[in-house]
Image: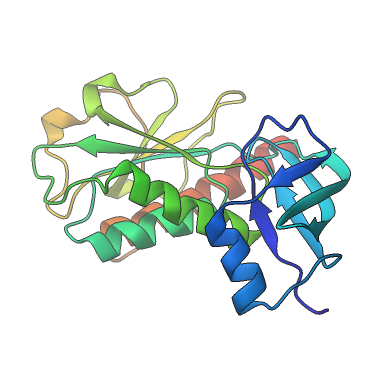
Amino acid sequence: MGHIPHLYVPGPWTASGLALESSHQHHLAKVLRMTDGDPVTYTDGAGTTGQGSLRDGGIERGDESHVARTITVGVAAAPPSSRQRCRFLVEKLAELAVERLIWVSTRHTQGRPPPEDKANTWIKGALEQSRGAWVMETSHAVIGDLDTEQLIVAQPSGEASVSVASSGTPLLLVGPEGGLDEDEIPPDVPRISLGPTVLRVETAAVVGASLLSRMQGLRGNH
C-alpha cells in the first residue's frame, strides 16, 4: 500500500484500541477502501505519534513515541475579509506546525474570525495532511493583550531580519489590509519586513511564520 493515512485522535488514550469518528471510518472504508489490518499512523496532537492498524472500525495501537517541538512560533493576525482566505491562513499555518494562531482585532480589521468548530476542522485536516504531531491552538485578543516581550511586527518599513529571543515563543503580528496605525503598535517592538512587495494578510502570515521558524532554527544551532 503506497499511502498510509495519518489520523488525529485526541487523547487521553487509555485502551489498547482507539475509536474513530464516523467521518474517519467513512473516508477510510469508502474512499480509501481500507480494511482490517491495513496500516495507519496516528497522533494525539500533543506530541505523541504511533503506528497501528485498522481493527473493527478503530485503530489497534502499535509502537508509539513522543515528538518534541523543535520550533515554536506564534502568529497574531487580523482576519482576512473572506472565509476562503481565512481558511488558507489557518491551514497553511497548521501545516507549518505553528504553535498558536491568535485572531486580533485592530482599527482597520475587515474580516471576522471563522467559527471555532470550522477552524478546528481545517486545523485537523492540515495536521493529518502534513503528518504532524502537534495541533495548532487558536484564540482571540486585542493588540494590547499581546505579550510584547516576544512580539515582532510585520511592517513594510521594517528590518530585513530581527533578533529572536533565546527562549520563549516569538509572536509575529500581522495587521489588516489597511495596515496598523502607528499608535496601535506597542513601543520598542521590533519590526520586520517580509519583502519588497505589500502582501495580503494570509500571505504575510505564512511568509512571516516560515521566516521566524528558520531564524529560530538557526538560533538553536548556536
Look at the image and tell me whether residue 21 can be seen: yes
In the figure, 197 relative to 164: above or below? below
Q: Is residue 39 left or right of residue 103?
A: right
In the depicted view, which residue is nearer to us: 7 or 68? Answer: 7
Tell me which colouring the rendered structure shows. rainbow
- Asked where in the image residue 127 lies, by quadrant, the reply is bottom right
Q: Is residue 171 left or right of residue 84?
A: right
In the depicted view, which residue is nearer to us: 47 or 117? Answer: 117
- Residue at position x 67%, y 43% in the image: 217
- Residue at position x 26%, y 28% in the image: 141
- Residue at position x 28%, y 56% in the image: 201
Q: Is residue 123 left or right of residue 35?
A: left
Q: Where's the N terminus, which quadrant? A: bottom right
Q: Where's the C terminus, which quadrant? A: top right
In the figure, 187 relative to 178: above or below? above
Q: Position of residue 153 (x, y in %)?
A: 33, 39
Q: Position of residue 110 (x, y in %)?
A: 11, 51
- Asked where in the image residue 192 lies, by quadrant, the reply is top left
- Residue at position x 76%, y 52% in the image: 59
In the figure, 55 relative to 108: above or below? below
Furthest residue in direction right, as rendered: 63
Q: Position of residue 128 (x, y in %)?
A: 61, 58
Look at the image and tell me whether residue 126 can be seen: no
Q: Position of residue 189 (x, y in %)?
A: 33, 28
In the depicted view, which residue is nearer to us: 43 or 217? Answer: 43
